[in-house]
Image: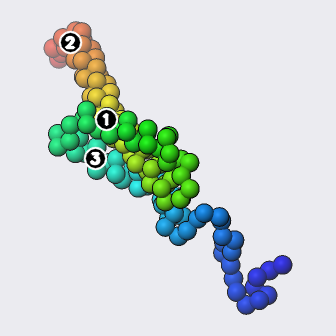
């Protein structure tokens, strides 16, 4: 049966899920985006030396422990989603310096390989022309 028959158009179901509210739904829909934005800002602060990396590791451990211990089982959706965002963003921040270290190592290895390859080339012969 079409809702257009009653003079209204519905683009999503009218059912209300138990334990959900507008703020909780907004957090759920945007949680990855929020977590990555927080991780990006914090990661930049870690890379420039404003936040010590060891403190980020400690906060990540606490964030994951809070999520596992109670956040994922919380009765309120806002608490579940906020604890997930907190844990994921802190884990991502821990990975930023590690990823920077790996990329730097790859760049150094590539430069060394290029230098060794260039050093092994025989000198160019002058043309007799």
Relative side of 122 to 103, left or right: left
Which quarter shows the C terminus? top left
Look at 28% across and 47% down and name the residue there: 42
Q: Which residue is identified by label 2?
A: 119
Give yes or no for contact between labels 3 and 2 (Cβ–Cβ under 8 Å): no
Q: Which of these two is toward me, 104 or 69? A: 69
Of circles 1 and 2, which is in front? 1
Look at 22% across and 45% down and name the residue there: 45
Q: Which residue is identified by label 1?
A: 58
| Residue 74 disc label | none
Is 19 rendered above or below residue 36?
below
Q: Which of these two is toward me, 118 or 59? A: 59
Q: Which residue is identified by label 3?
A: 42
Look at 75% across and 85% down and name the residue there: 4
Q: Indicate the secondary structure of the residue bearing disc 1.
A: helix
Q: Give the image's coloring scheme.
A: rainbow
Q: Which of these two is toward me, 51 or 80? A: 80
Q: Which of these two is toward me, 18 or 11? A: 18
Is 126 rendered above or below residue 104?
above
Is 85 rendered above or below residue 61?
below
Relative side of 43 to 124, left or right: right
């Amino acid at each position: 049966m079409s809702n257009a028959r009653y003079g209204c158009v519905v683009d999503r179901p009218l059912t209300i899920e138990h334990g959900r509210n507008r703020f909780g739904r907004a957090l759920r829909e945007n949680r990855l985006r929020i977590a990555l934005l927080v991780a990006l800002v914090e990661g930049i602060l870690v890379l420039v030396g404003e936040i010590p990396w060891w403190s980020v590791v400690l906060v990540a451990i606490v964030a994951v422990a809070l999520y596992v211990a109670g956040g994922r089982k919380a009765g309120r959706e806002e608490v579940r989603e906020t604890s997930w965002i907190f844990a994921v963003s802190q884990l991502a921040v821990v990975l930023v310096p590690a990823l920077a270290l790996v990329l730097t190592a790859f760049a150094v290895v590539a430069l060394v390989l290029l230098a060794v390859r260039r050093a092994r080339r025989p000198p160019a012969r002058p043309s007799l022309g």
